C-alpha cells in the first residue's frame, strides 16, 4: 500500500474521481445509500488503468455493487460504470449504436498500449477542459430507440448472484447463505463478455433486442370502420388529460378524451377514422408520457344497450359497461353522458344489488308508475332509518341504489339517475320522508367524491335527494369541512 | 498458554476444582487449532478458536462473578495464566455487552462506515434473521436476544 502513496499519480495517468457515473437501476431505490470510495483500488476492466472504485448496496435485497470500468471508458461510450448500459436509454451499446447509427468503434483502439495511450490522452484532454467529440448528447432519439428504451429502473439485476454450491447440491450454509438458491438460467444469453458488451460487438443481448425490435407489431386498424377510439393503458395519476391531448392532437382532431382513473386507462376518440388510424400508427409502442410507457390499443365497440333517454341514460348502465370490459366503454354517446356525470361513475356498484327489491326490468320505454314501488307510496327501508349517513356510506354500496330516490322535480334535470332508470319526475307524494328543503343540486354526481366521504354526512346539508344521488354530490368545497363534524357524528353514532 | 503443570507455579486453593474443566477446554482449543481447513471458508476456519476462547473466559467469569465459587485470588490467577481474556471479561461487566462474542465485533475500525458487526444488532431490528458474522461466526450477541 505504501508504494501507492509514493507514486506520482498525475504522471501515471491513474484516474481519480469524486462520484461514480451510474444509472438509476444500479444506484438503487434507497435514497440513503452509503458508498465507500477507494482510490486506485482496482483496474478498469476495459483499459486496465487503476481508478477510483465506489462500492454501495443498491437497496435492501441487493448485493453490493461496485464500479467496474473507469470514468474515462464510461464517458467514451456514455455508459454506466457498473452495468455498461447506456445512461439515457438503458440499452446495450450495440443496440444504441445501431439504432442511432453512431459508429465510434474505429476511433477507440482495443489492444495493448494503443488502448492505454488513447485512454490517457482522452483523460488528459477531458481534465484540461477540451471538448472531445461526444455525439451522445446531441443525437435525436429516433423511433426505434424510443420503442426499445427502458423507462423504469430495473432492480432485478441487483439481486445476489446464484449460489454455485446450491447448483451442485452442496450448499452447507443453509438459511444464512446470501446467494440465491435458484437454478441458473442457461442459454445463449449467459455467455457474455464485458469487452464485447462495451465495444458493441457480438453482444447476445443486443442481438436479441434488435431482432425483437424488428418484429414489433404495429397496431392494426380493426375491421369495424366506425371505431375511432384508442385505448390508452398503464396510466398513472401523473398523466393528465392535458398530457394526452398534447400527445394526440397532432394526428387528428380529437373528439373527446375520457380518463378512467380507476382502471388506469383512458379513451381517446377522434372525429375521423383517419385521425385515429394515424395516431395509432405513429404512437404505438412509442407512447411515453412523463416517463411512463403507455399501451395503445384500439377501443372496442359497446353493444347497443337499452336506454330510456339518450343523454340521461342509466348511469348504472354505464357502470355496468365499465364493470365489464374496458375497451368496450367508449362510444361517443357514452362519452357525452360522461361529461356531466364526471369521470368516476364506474365506481358505482352494479345496479343489481338491491336490498329487498327485485331489480326492475330494463326497458327502453317509459315505466308505468305501478312498476315503481316507491311511487305507490311504499317506504323503502334504509339501514339508518332516515339518517342520510347510511346512504353515504358505501356499505357494499347496497343501499344507495334504492335510496337513489328520484329526486324532487326541481333537481331532476341535473341529477343522477335512480337505479331504475326511469325518467319521469316523481309525483309530489314522493317527497315526503326524504326531502326537506333541499339545497339546489350539488348534484353532479361525482362518484369519486362519494367514495371518499366515508364518514356519514350530517343530515341537513345532504339529505334526501342528494343522498339519493349516489355519488356524494358535494363539490369539493363542501367535502372538506364536512368530514370534521361528521367524523364526530359517526363516532357518536357508533357508541 | 500453560499446559503443563510445573513446580514453579504456586496454585491457589480451589484450583483442583476447576482444573479438570480448564484442561478439557484447553484440549478442545488444541483440536480446533490443528483442524484442517478443508471444506471451510477462509474466515470460517477461525470461528472455532473464537468460540472456544469465549467459552473459556465465560466459564471463569461465571464462576467468579455469577456463582461466586472462586476466590478473587484464584480468579486473578486464572487471568494471569491466560485461561481467560481479561479484556473480554471487562466488556461483559458493562450494560448491553453481557453476551459479547468477541472483541473484534465491536471494533469500529475494523468495519466499513465505522459501525459494529451485524451480530451486535438485535434480531427484531435486523432485516436478515439468520446471520453468521464474518469475524467469529456469531449468530447474535445482543443482550436482548
Image (cartoon, rainbow, N blue to C red):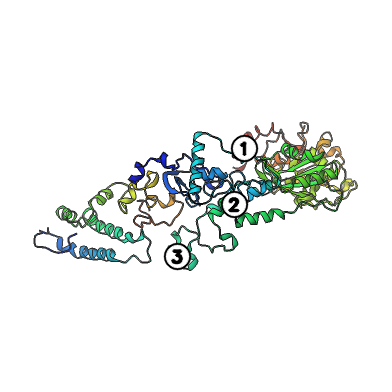
Q: Which residue is mark 2?
A: A200
| C-alpha distance separating marks 2 and 3 | 37 Å
- What residue appears at the point 36 percent right and 42 percent down from the top-left corner? A7
- Write down the quadrant of residue B137 in the picture: bottom left
Question: From the viewer's perspective, is residue A170 above or below residue B69?
Answer: below
For residue A228, side relative to residue B99 (left or right) = right
Q: State the image coordinates of residue A262 (x, y, percent, origin top left).
A: 70, 45
Q: State the image coordinates of residue A453 (x, y, percent, origin top left).
A: 67, 39
Q: State the image coordinates of residue B77 (x, y, percent, origin top left).
A: 15, 55
Q: Are marks 3 and 1 on the same chain?
A: yes
Which chain does the residue under circle 1 lie in?
A
Nearer to us: label 3 or label 1: 3
Q: Which residue is mark 1?
A: A487
N-term mark: 1 or 2 = 2
- Asked if labels 3 and 2 touch by Cβ distance under 8 angstroms, the answer is no
Q: Nearer the viewer, residue A372 or B133?
A: B133
Residue A433 appears anywhere in the view: no
Which chain does the residue under circle 2 lie in?
A
For residue B128, side relative to residue A192 (left or right) = left
Question: From the viewer's perspective, is residue A256 above or below residue A227?
Answer: above
Q: Are marks 1 and 2 on the same chain?
A: yes
Nearer to us: label 2 or label 3: 2
- What residue appears at the point 21 percent right and 62 percent down from the top-left corner? B22
Q: Which residue is mark 3?
A: A171
N-term mark: 3 or 1 = 3
Amino acid at each position: 500500500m505504501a508504494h501507492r502513496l509514493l507514486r506520482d499519480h498525475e504522471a501515471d495517468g491513474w484516474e481519480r474521481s469524486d462520484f461514480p457515473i451510474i444509472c438509476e437501476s444500479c444506484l438503487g431505490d434507497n435514497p440513503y445509500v452509503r458508498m465507500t470510495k477507494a482510490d486506485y483500488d482496482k483496474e478498469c476492466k476495459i483499459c486496465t488503468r487503476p481508478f477510483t472504485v465506489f462500492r454501495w448496496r443498491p437497496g435492501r435485497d441487493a448485493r453490493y455493487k461496485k464500479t467496474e470500468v473507469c470514468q474515462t471508458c464510461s464517458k467514451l461510450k456514455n455508459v454506466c460504470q457498473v452495468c455498461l448500459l447506456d445512461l439515457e436509454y438503458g440499452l446495450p451499446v450495440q443496440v444504441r449504436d445501431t439504432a442511432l447509427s453512431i459508429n465510434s468503434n474505429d476511433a477507440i483502439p482495443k489492444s495493448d498500449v494503443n488502448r492505454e495511450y488513447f485512454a490517457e490522452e482522452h483523460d488528459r484532454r477531458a481534465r484540461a477542459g477540451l471538448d472531445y467529440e461526444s455525439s451522445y448528447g446531441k443525437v435525436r432519439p429516433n423511433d426505434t430507440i424510443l420503442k426499445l428504451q427502458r423507462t423504469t429502473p430495473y432492480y432485478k439485476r441487483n439481486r445476489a448472484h446464484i449460489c454455485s454450491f446450491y447448483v451442485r447440491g452442496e450448499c452447507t450454509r443453509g438459511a444464512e447463505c446470501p446467494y440465491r438458491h435458484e437454478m441458473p438460467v442457461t442459454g445463449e444469453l449467459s455467455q457474455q463478455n464485458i469487452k464485447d458488451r462495451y465495444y458493441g460487438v457480438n453482444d447476445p443481448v443486443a442481438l436479441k433486442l434488435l431482432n425483437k425490435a424488428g418484429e414489433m407489431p404495429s397496431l392494426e386498424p380493426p375491421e369495424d370502420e366506425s371505431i375511432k377510439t384508442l385505448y390508452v393503458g398503464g396510466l398513472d395519476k401523473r398523466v393528465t388529460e392535458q398530457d394526452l391531448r398534447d400527445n394526440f392532437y397532432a394526428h387528428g382532431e380529437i373528439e373527446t378524451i375520457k380518463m378512467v382513473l380507476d382502471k388506469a386507462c383512458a379513451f381517446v376518440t377522434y372525429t375521423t377514422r383517419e385521425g385515429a388510424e394515424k395516431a395509432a400508427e405513429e404512437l404505438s409502442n412509442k407512447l411515453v408520457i412523463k416517463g411512463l410507457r403507455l399501451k395503445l390499443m384500439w377501443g372496442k365497440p359497446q353493444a347497443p344497450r337499452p336506454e330510456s333517454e339518450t343523454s340521461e341514460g342509466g348511469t348504472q348502465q354505464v357502470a355496468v359497461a365499465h364493470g365489464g370490459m374496458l375497451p368496450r366503454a367508449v362510444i361517443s354517446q357514452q362519452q357525452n353522458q360522461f361529461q356531466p356525470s364526471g369521470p368516476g361513475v364506474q365506481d358505482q356498484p352494479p345496479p343489481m344489488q338491491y336490498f329487498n327489491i327485485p331489480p326492475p326490468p330494463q326497458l327502453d320505454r317509459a315505466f308505468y308508475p305501478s312498476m315503481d314501488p316507491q311511487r305507490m307510496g311504499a317506504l323503502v327501508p334504509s339501514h339508518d332509518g332516515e339518517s342520510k349517513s347510511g346512504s353515504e356510506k358505501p356499505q357494499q354500496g347496497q343501499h344507495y341504489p334504492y335510496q337513489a330516490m328520484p329526486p324532487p322535480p326541481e333537481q331532476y334535470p341535473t341529477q343522477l339517475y335512480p337505479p331504475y332508470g326511469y325518467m319521469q319526475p316523481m309525483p309530489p307524494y314522493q317527497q315526503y320522508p326524504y326531502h326537506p328543503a333541499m339545497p339546489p343540486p350539488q348534484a353532479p354526481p361525482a362518484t369519486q367524491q362519494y367514495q371518499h366521504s366515508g364518514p356519514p354526512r350530517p343530515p341537513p346539508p345532504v339529505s334526501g335527494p342528494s343522498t339519493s344521488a349516489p355519488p356524494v354530490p358535494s363539490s369539493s368545497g363542501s367535502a372538506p369541512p364536512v368530514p370534521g363534524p361528521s367524523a364526530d357524528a359517526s363516532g357518536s353514532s357508533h357508541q | 498458554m500453560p499446559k503443563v503443570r510445573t513446580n514453579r507455579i504456586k496454585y491457589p486453593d480451589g484450583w483442583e476444582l476447576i482444573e479438570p474443566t480448564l484442561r478439557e477446554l484447553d484440549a478442545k482449543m488444541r483440536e480446533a487449532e490443528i483442524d484442517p481447513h478443508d471444506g471451510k471458508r477462509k474466515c470460517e476456519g477461525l470461528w472455532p478458536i473464537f468460540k472456544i476462547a469465549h467459552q473459556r473466559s465465560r466459564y471463569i467469569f461465571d464462576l467468579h462473578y455469577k456463582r461466586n465459587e472462586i476466590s478473587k485470588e484464584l480468579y486473578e490467577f486464572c487471568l494471569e495464566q491466560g485461561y481467560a481474556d481479561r479484556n473480554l471479561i471487562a466488556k461483559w461487566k458493562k450494560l448491553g455487552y453481557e453476551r459479547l462474542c468477541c472483541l473484534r465485533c465491536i471494533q469500529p475500525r475494523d468495519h466499513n462506515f465505522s459501525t459494529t458487526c451485524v451480530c451486535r444488532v438485535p434480531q427484531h431490528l435486523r432485516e436478515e434473521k439468520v446471520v453468521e458474522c464474518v469475524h467469529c461466526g456469531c449468530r447474535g450477541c445482543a443482550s436482548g436476544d
